[in-house]
Amino acid sequence: MTQNLPSVIYHPLSELTQRNEVELIIKGTFAALSSKHITAIVNAFFLSTKICVNGIPYIAIGSLSAILRTGNSKAERPLVYQGIPGVLSAAQIIEINGVEHISGPTLRALIDVRMHLADGRTKLYLQVAMQSYERILNLSQVRDLKEVFLDDIRNNRPLLKSQRIAELNIAHCEFTGTPFFDRHEVEFAHIESVVTNPMLALDVNNGVIILKEIHRELTRLGIHDFKGMYKHCQTKGYSTAWSGQ
């Protein structure tokens, strides 16, 4: 399934760092391996990786054969689109500028599975791929993006309640219709939680203004998404006008 993430900025890795910064950790460690194949792996990462504003890498599917060492067999495609029953789920496909990508954590899982099923030099080249990925994560430029993103959430998340109340002129709990006379009686509850969808953490439309005790109940029940919140409202007889459905 292909999906578009919310409108965010992606930085080509080549704009954030030099190629040798990715390659640096590889040289020497794998001196016995073919420099041609190592170069192919590093180039695949360097030319096809986009770094999201939250610091998470996304890698173009078209470059995975070099990284996953599947050659001309195109075996990377069933690994991505189908997974391995009982071992690895099909990947979630993210479309960036019309090109299909998978996330860095998904790629890490694919490399790990391939390493378990490979031996000899193929396994060593997969270790090169894993170390290349780890090197990207530890680049100061990538870490800085992540820190700025998290800092933005920390600083602006407390403002969401006042922002939603002001923009929509809310004076009642959006679930029960109970009027509130003090803003301390209510809280901004994320529909898609910050844990499960951090890209929507500061979206004022990704939340509802509800009584504190109801928010605590949602937290206690482990409700983290639209589906869970909508079902909870139906079960409790709360309004679902907030959902737009």
Image: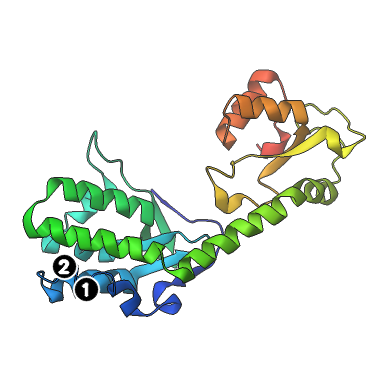
Q: Can residue 118 be seen in this view?
A: yes
Query: What residue is drawn where x is 26% and y is 74%?
Result: 43
Query: What residue is drawn where x is 44% and y is 64%?
Result: 96
- Residue 215 lies in what quarter of the image? top right
In this rendering, the answer to whether 87 lies above or below 197 is above
Q: Is residue 60 visible?
A: no
Q: In this view, does 205 lie to the left or right of 143?
A: right
Q: Is mark 1 on a helix, strand or loop?
A: loop
User: What residue is shown with label 2?
Assistant: 30
User: What residue is shown with label 1?
Assistant: 27
- Residue 243 lies in what quarter of the image? top right
Give how far across and how far down residue 158 sits, in percent: 74, 48
Nearest to the observer: residue 55 or residue 245: 55
Seen from this angle, which residue lies furthest front? 28
Label 1 neighbour load within 10 Å: few <14, some 14-19, many 20+: some
Q: Do the residues labelled 2 and 1 touch (CB within 8 Å)?
A: yes
Q: Is mark 2 on a helix, strand or loop?
A: loop
Which amino acid does the dot numbered 1 rest on? Lys
Q: In this view, does 242 lie to the left or right of 139?
A: right
In this rendering, the answer to whether 241 lies above or below 8 is above
